[in-house]
Amino acid sequence: MSAVTTSESLAGTMKLVGGELCLDFVNTVGGRIPRGAGATGSSVIADKLGAYTDLVAWSRHTRSMAEADARRLLRLAEGHPREAAAVLGRARLFREALHRTLRTLMLGRRPAAEDLARINDEVAAARKREVLAPSPGGLRWEGPDPGTCLESPLWPVGRSAAAFLTSGDLSRLRQCGGERCGWLFADRSRNRTRRWCTMEDCGNVSKVRRFRRRHSPRRV
Ligand SMILES: [Zn+2]
């Protein structure tokens, strides 16, 4: 059987620059235009999660799901298109709640209760059926079989969000300085000077703009 092809999906080929799974999830958009009070809200440009298959392609791409499970999920989704579409809708709402919450925290404000409620729901869903099971080193958390549950691509994201948001230090959280980008990342550079999602995408564009502004003849 052929592998789950991620190359046909924008979510399956996107750059993974967030440094945390939950940030790469928030970045499943072509870009964002800030809107609303304090610009914690945003309009999404070119959503990369256009179909349920994109969500599975993203899970493979980020290696948060095994190949065999992804194949089983895609088959399951074919037989249950309505349920798969509902999970996709849920994924997008979760992503936006997560994005607003991260932006709000970056600005030192209190997250909206409804956004926190949605994040809590997804964290609870990720942990709902986890049990402690024997492992070589002692015990480990074991979840239900991801290949049998359409919502399973969201579980690792829920766990990542819970761990990152409760890490006690979000001071490395940044938003790319690129215009209409809005991607978030954890700045793990030694001097904490990272400004761009990637140099090739936003860094160079900005450099070229600055250069042009500096060297173009003054407009009349
Ligand atoms: Zn960028």
Image (cartoon, rainbow, N blue to C red):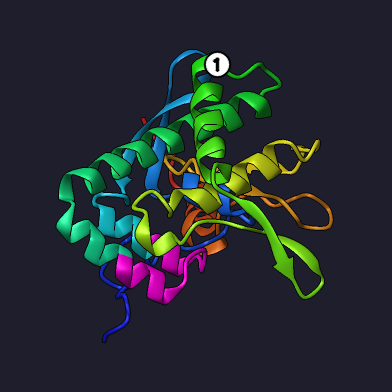
In the image, residue 60 lies in the stretch drawn in magenta: yes
Q: Main secondary structure of the magenta part?
A: helix
- The 10 Å Cα crowd at callout 1, few under 14, some 14 to 19, many 20 or more, is few
In the image, residue 189 lies in the stretch drawn in magenta: no
- Is residue 175 something that shows in the picture? no
Q: Secondary structure at mark 1?
A: loop
Query: Tag count in the figure?
Result: 1
Query: Is residue 133 rendered to the left or right of residue 77?
Result: right
Task: Pick the quarter of the image with the C terminus.
Answer: top left
Give percent across and percent down for residue 159.
Answer: 61, 47
Give percent across and percent down for residue 113.
Answer: 55, 15
Residue 18: which quarter of the image?
bottom right
Q: Where is 148 relative to 50, above or below?
A: below
Q: Where is 59 relative to 167, above or below?
A: below
Residue drawn 43% across the image and 44% down it:
217
Q: What residue range appears in magenta? A: 58-72
Q: Nearer the viewer, residue 192 or 78?
A: 78
Q: What amino acid type is highlighted by mark number 1?
A: Ala
- Is residue 186 something that shows in the picture? yes
Which residue matches tag 1?
112
Query: Is residue 137 rendered to the left or right of residue 128?
Result: right
